[in-house]
Amino acid sequence: MKNLRIFLNATIVCGTLLFSQLVTAQKITQKTTTIIVTGTSPLHDWEMNGSTASFSGMVNGNTISNATLTMPVTNLKSKKGKSMDNKAYEALKSAQNPTISFSSSSVSIGKGNITGKLTIAGVSKNVTFPISVSKRENTYTIYGTEVLKLSDFGMSRPGFMGIKTGDEITVKVNIVAE
């Protein structure tokens, strides 16, 4: 009888903890997304911007779990025109790999590092980079910046008439999610 009481009490405690976790979890999706990619070449620095992406995650306490960001490659646009855009899409192998994606199992609210899988041009890499996540009421602002190498993702440096861009690019991501 004593063992049955202990078992029932343990079951009630575990059930209560599980239920409270399910009740407090909140799905969030992007309200706005801004992605800026910058790089260099011997002639000029360049920049591409993207504002159409898909982000989602589950908030539970001070953690966002199952965070995913997906952006169509062709949503990146430059101020230099279609010629530069097309060269970038070719380097990103957009015909075969139309999206850039990032997923992380968990990210904490505050400043720290995020670890996850980044897929660009069909090549996936485990990456870790600095990130800042702030919360204001039901709105989460996620900001991160990182320097990446095109060659790490099997990409050729785009160029024109033998002049090629640098191998390093800087990627800045700003997401506002609710």
Image (spheres, grey):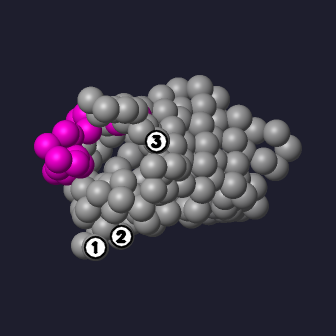
Q: Is residue 36 visible?
A: yes
**CA neighbours of label 3 inside 10 A, class few (<14), some (14 to 19), many (20+):** some
- Tell me the quadrant of the picture where the N terminus can be found: bottom right
**Residue depicted at x 75% and y 61%:** 23
Query: Was residue 164 drawn as part of the magenta stretch in this picture?
Result: yes
The residue labelled by disc 2 is: 98
Q: Which residue is rendered at x = 72% and y = 45% of the image?
A: 140
Question: Mark 1 to mark 2: distance in Å?
Answer: 6 Å
Image: magenta residue range:
153-170
Q: Residue at x 35, y 70 (%)?
A: 98
For disc 3, the marked residue is: 47
Name which of mark 3 and mark 2 comes first in the sequence.
3
Q: Given the current orientation, which residue lies at the most extreme bottom position?
A: 95
* Label 1 packing within 10 angstroms: few (<14), some (14-19), many (20+): few
Earlier residue among tags 3 and 1: 3
**In this view, the mark in front (3 or 1):** 3
* Alpha-carbon span between mark 3 and mark 1: 21 Å
* Label 2: how many Cα within 10 Å (few below 14, some 14–19, many 20+): some
Label 1: state its secondary structure.
Answer: loop
Locate residue 92 relative to residue 71 in the image: left or right.
left
Residue, disc 1: 95
Amino acid residing under circle 1: Ala
Quadrant into which the C terminus falls: bottom right
Residue 124 counted in the magenta span: no
